[in-house]
Image (spheres, coloured by chain):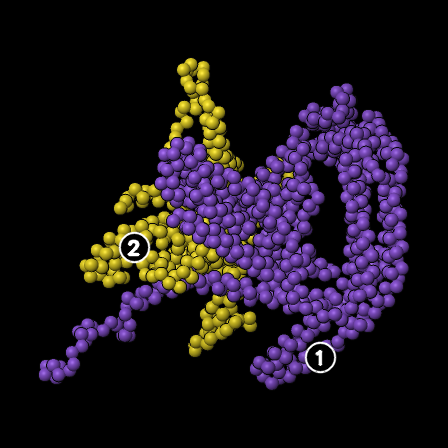
Amino acid sequence: MQTPAQDTATPGTNPFAKQKSHRETKESLIKWTLRSATYVILIITASIFTHIFIRGAPVVFSLTPPFINTSFLTKLPETLHVLEDKQGKKYETTPTGVDVIKKQLGDNLRNEKTISYSGGGILGPIVGTILLVGVCVVVALGLGIASAIYLSEYAKQGKFIEMARLAILNLSGVPSVVFGLFGLGMFVLSAPKITSHPLDRSLLAIPLGFGEYISFEGWDTSVLAGGFTLAFVILPVVITASEECLKAVPQGFRETSLALGATKWQTIWKCVLPFAMPGILTSSILGIARAAGETAPIMFTAALAFKDKLPWQGDTGIMGIFTQSVQALPYHIYTLSARIPQNEYSERAQYGSVFVFLVLVMSLAGASVILRRKLRAKYKW
Amino acid sequence: MEPEKKADAPFNAKDLIKPKRFLGLHVDKQNIIKWFFGSNAGVTIVVLFLIMFFLAREGVGFLPTYQWELSVYRLAGLEFCDYVEKPISEQVAMHSKLKRALGAELNTVSKVDRDRRDAALLAKSRIEDKVTLQTEPLQEALKAKAPPEKTDPLRVALTQATTAAVSTATLPAIFTAEEQIQLKAELSALQPDQAELPPFLKSLMAKSAQKTSEAKLKYAALISTVDAFDDTAEKLTKVHSEIKKIALETKEAANQLHMAEDAKKQLLEAATTAKTEAEKQAFLKDAAATSLAAIDFKVRTQPLRDKLPELEKLIPEYITAIKKAAEGIPENAETPEARKLISQVRTQLPKHLSHVEQCTQLMRDWDYAKPVPITQSLTSFLFGGDWITNSSWQDFYGVVPLLTGSCLIALVAMLISMPFSVAAAIYTNQFASLREQDFIKPTIEFIQAIPSVVLGFIGISVLGDLIKSISLLPFLSWVPGFPVQERLNMFNAGLLLAFMAIPTMFSLAEDAINNVPRAFSEASEALGATKLQTVFKVIVPASVSGILAAMLLGLGRIIGETMVVLLVAGNRIAIPDFSDGIGTVFQPAHTLTGIIAQELGEVSRGSSHWQALFMVGILLFCISLIINFFARQVVKRFKFHKS
């Protein structure tokens, strides 16, 4: 690597310095062009982050104790009502508080505005995103690690393996909105489900004998459908990352274990996976961050613009959490930025949710980067 | 257990090994594990096929549905009406262009004074807005005919507020300093019950009105030309709207019949699965009651054909009229805008005339009974220029406007992201110090984790206004397309997508450069080449196919991105007007991905619109496969390079 030290010498400081030739000037010019292109990217990134932090952090944090605006994080989204009295004083309030203030003001009320989704907090979307990502992680890691083990430990060159690799490659290029369509067609409208009353649109209903049917009628828009769809979006990432980690485990480990009489499975379970697992998990976090950020796949499979209950409120039981649609942070941001007008009242909810979302996703991605670095230092073969 | 017997049996080494059993079955446990993992690896293949299957299941029905819709379009005579519709809409477009040209010409005389008037009125209404709090009680008091001692304090408060508001207001530079003082004085003295405007404002209004009439006088010839142009199509439009009504009624009847057929089919189906005899009878009765009187399209379209002689007579009349009106269009206009618009109309006119002439022939040849082949529904989907939904006339699902939008945005994004990502990859890999590398690489990879909806939000809240205000800077007015009309446009979306694609392109390109064998650069340096020569003459050419593959994969990401284009591209479904040249990119557009995300939530399952959206999904899926295929081909060449 070169250092630009010589470039800075000017005739004023060192009279004996060699005059820069035409070619040298040209070279350093080109080099600086390349360098500035690189730093433009970094500066744009930094300015986007600072913009969101400056506008969004005040919504969540405050300068006075207790420093955190808990109501934004612990309340559900609701419609914001803005009342103005004749003295020009403005009251921002919730749907329940409107009548109280109206009664107080009486004749003094001048005008009333409502801004959808902009009041309250964003607990609903946060919980929804966590549920979706939870389902997605279980499915994607299960399938992804298992396929990676096959690809790296068992597979021999052949038709099947070539096809699998081709499929992974193509799957990673499929647009996320197409995954959304797939999720809608498969999980929402035709995945198998155990029910006692199959719907008319069911593709196939197999009676189980005790009054229940396995009916291919789909899971409706639900956490389960959304989580599965997201899992397939990030599956290629998880497989590729896991395979890399498995391949990084030295071949000697496997040979030693097999030479001692261990079976193939014992070798994988005791001598390969323990060393690859931390790497697999950390690089999968990056995939999870991507899943948390995707909007298009959950638009038709899981997300809801507005819901006034948390998933576990209601009488549907534990499984009910997964079979209902939820609000999700990315979709909430989409709703906030596309469906309601931009004004001073909607800004709080917009920048607040973008800030929280970005912090969530970025801390996942950051954790992955830092952990990976630490792991690299720890496992050096 | 008798040892002798065993000795007699032929010796078999396999008997010594305990047979492999798992859960009581004669299967090797290791094999089961292997199959388990293998089947998991197969999931990706299965998923790929499932995607195709489900897209096809929901989408392929589009072809017959659309074929049916198109055949009704023809049978009911809507097609016939659209033959006339096309020239009429062209005429309307040309007329609006002439009107804009006229406006530009009139502005040369009247604009200054009108602007002064508008600016003064704007300042007035702004100040009135600011003091509404004080005005309202005064108005109420005046309404209630309160005595002066009550209204006077209110008046004082109002005047104070107005003066305060006026002192903070800034007036544009089109007023001289003295005029500004005068205007401000007048504005601060405003009262809600004032009968007349103050003198200076009044004089501004009068001046503007006078100039407007002067302008009208000056351009009287042009005005009468534009009016004559407007009148040309009057008769044609009248007949057209008459036949439209008839055609729509026929279409309505056809749709009703179709629904009745469906209902009958369902009733009959229900009858076969009915549990009790009584239910079955009820269903059958209902089915029998549904009348399925066939529509005689020949009779129904007869009135349309009857209008043909009238139309045939009107069209030559229209042609002579428009030719005459076109003669009045001036050769030269004063303003460049008017000149541009008029020349556009001039170039359009011959095309328009030929369309009009063709339309007679088309109407004569029109046959309601000509069948619509199923291939036509595919071709009109792939090459149709209109995407019109929920229309009271006829829905069209032509993908061309969406495809052009997607492609133009991708083009902008690629043009911006390619130089940046390649430059950054070269710099990071070849010139940056190790510490710099450690900082640049993770940061750029970090961009990948920024959710697209957040970038879309940035585009709506910041970038749109930024681009608009930059485009208003006077020293940038030479840039084509400036000043920008729409905040949300293709350029805005392209910029954000470029930023999104940079990490993908950067890391893959950097990998490709990194894979160039060390011997290459060592050999080059040993021959006395400088670092820069080595980089651009040896390393970059050696890794060019890898870089190309990186660009292609980046393109795949750009085309497939949904949220940014949905939020930022402006969502106008129309083929962009390419007459602006490069400035076209500042127009809003809609995209393949955006249309799915926007419309799928609002359509009912199984309708032609729903199926059309799945067809768009199939198209996107094919595009992504093709891009991937090319990227792979390019990488294959790269391998050959290395050896």
Residue at position x 45%, y 40% in the image: B540
Q: Nearer the viewer, residue A289 or B231?
A: B231
- Where on the picture, by quarter, is residue A269? bottom left
With B32 as the anchor, is B514 left or right in this view? right
Q: Chain of mark 1?
A: B
Q: Position of residue B137 (x, y in %)?
A: 73, 34
Rendering colour (chain A): yellow
* Between B303 and A228, the one nearer to me in the picture: B303
Q: In the picture, which quadrant includes the N terminus of chain B? A: bottom left
State the image coordinates of residue B198 (x, y, percent, origin top left).
82, 27
Please determine whether, in this image, residue B206 is positioned above or below residue A374.
above
Q: What residue is at 81 percent from the left and 29 percent from the top?
A: B113
Note whether residue A36 is visible: no
Numbered label attached to residue B289: 1
Q: Colour of chain B?
A: purple
SS at mark 1? helix
Residue B285: horizontal and vertical position, in percent?
A: 68, 82
Pointer 2: residues within 10 angstroms few (<14), some, or many (20+)? some
CA distance separating discs 2 and 1: 70 Å
The secondary element bearing badge 2 is classed as helix
Classed neighbour count for the residue bearing mark 1: other residues with Cα under 10 Å, few (<14), some (14–19), many (≥20): few
Disc 2 designates what residue? Answer: A273
Task: Answer above or below: position of B110 versus B18.
Answer: above
